[in-house]
Image (tube, helix red, strand yellow):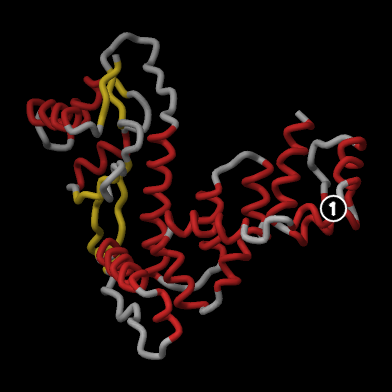
């Protein structure tokens, strides 16, 4: 609907002064592909340009929120680039504008923006993958997807909302922990950043892609929600993104050498820990 598209354009204009100027100077080009009427375009142009700049800290506040979810990857990006303007540039990026106009996730867009910088850091790539997966779990926990069981009335099992499983190079979690420790120390006296002898990030732990770390992600209030897991559990959680007949899951696990009784016990254990749900 055009009024919704118009509202999203106004959000983009508040965040991006350069885009706002383009709307005034060349509205047809700036709003190409956006479903707004000529009248609505006229309403935008009738607003004093200065109105879009009444909240000069809007970008900084929003960046702080995004930094909170991607503190590891953002810190590594800043350590490489040494310029906060690069992160602030997210609000002028195609990733940001696309997320706002299409009602996408800002967290997903921010992760895509960091990845698009191509900084050539294996540590950044690994930590970003972990933080992006955690962000996705948090959003799924807030807005659980509708997971309908198949038409057949077989008992089904599916991964619980807000649960994820990832496989990352060993050293990834240790890298994130080191960054968080550094940020905590720096937060005790932020003015230390002005000093030449301020605490530094230090050498990062080595990464080993040939020896992956498998992690369960289950973020909840008051904890990190990250645990180690074995290969079989990771495969099960990865494959249960949609409801699957329980008998098929047990048969599949038995075919991998686990045995039917142990397979059934594994699913029962995952159910008890809140990692999977049974349907119905």
Q: Quadrant of residue 113?
A: bottom right
Q: Quadrant of residue 40?
A: top right
Image quadrant where one finds the N terminus: top right
- Horizontally, residue 155 falls left or right of residue 134, namely left
For the residue pair 100 and 236, the one nearer the viewer reads as 100
Q: Position of residue 62 (x, y in %)?
A: 56, 55
Q: Quadrant of residue 204?
A: bottom left
**Which residue does the image show at 23% across and 31% down from the upper left?**
274
* Residue on which the image places disc 1: 23
- Horizontally, residue 243 falls left or right of residue 68, namely left
**Which residue does the image show at 88% across and 50% down from the upper left?**
27
Q: Position of residue 267 (x, y in %)?
A: 17, 29
For the residue pair 64 and 150, the one nearer the viewer reads as 64
For the residue pair 97 and 253, the one nearer the viewer reads as 97
**Which residue does the image show at 24% across and 21% down from the upper left?**
246
Q: Position of residue 253 (x, y in %)?
A: 18, 32
202, above or below 260, in the image: below
Please tell me how crowded label 1 is: few (under 14), some (14-19), or many (20+) other residues with Cα within 10 Å. some
195, above or below 260, in the image: below
For the residue pair 275 and 258, the one nearer the viewer reads as 275
**Which residue does the image show at 39% across and 49% down from the upper left?**
133
Q: Position of residue 78 (x, y in %)?
A: 48, 73
């Amino acid at each position: 609907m055009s009024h919704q598209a118009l509202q999203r354009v106004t959000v983009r204009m508040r965040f991006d002064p350069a885009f706002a100027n383009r709307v005034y100077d060349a509205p047809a080009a700036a709003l190409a592909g956006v479903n707004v009427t000529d009248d609505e375009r006229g309403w935008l142009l009738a607003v004093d340009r200065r109105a879009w700049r009444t909240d000069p800290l809007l970008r900084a506040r929003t960046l702080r929120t995004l930094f909170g979810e991607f503190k590891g990857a953002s810190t590594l990006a800043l350590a490489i680039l040494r310029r906060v303007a690069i992160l602030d540039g997210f609000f002028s990026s195609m990733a940001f504008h696309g997320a706002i106009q299409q009602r996408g996730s800002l967290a997903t867009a921010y992760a895509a923006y960091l990845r698009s910088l191509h900084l050539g850091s294996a540590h950044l790539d690994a930590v970003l993958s972990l933080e992006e997966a955690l962000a996705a779990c948090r959003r799924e926990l807030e807005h659980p997807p509708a997971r309908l069981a198949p038409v057949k009335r077989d008992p089904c099992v599916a991964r619980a909302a807000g649960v994820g499983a990832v496989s990352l190079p060993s050293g990834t979690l240790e890298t994130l922990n080191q960054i968080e420790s550094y940020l905590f120390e720096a937060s005790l006296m932020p003015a230390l950043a002005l000093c030449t002898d301020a605490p530094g990030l230090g050498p990062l732990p080595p990464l080993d892609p040939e020896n992956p770390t498998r992690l369960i992600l289950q973020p909840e209030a008051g904890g990190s929600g990250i645990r180690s897991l074995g290969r079989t559990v990771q495969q099960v959680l990865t494959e249960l993104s949609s409801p699957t007949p329980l008998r098929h899951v047990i048969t599949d696990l038995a075919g991998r050498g686990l045995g039917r009784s142990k397979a059934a016990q594994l699913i029962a254990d995952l159910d008890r820990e809140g990692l999977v749900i049974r349907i119905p």
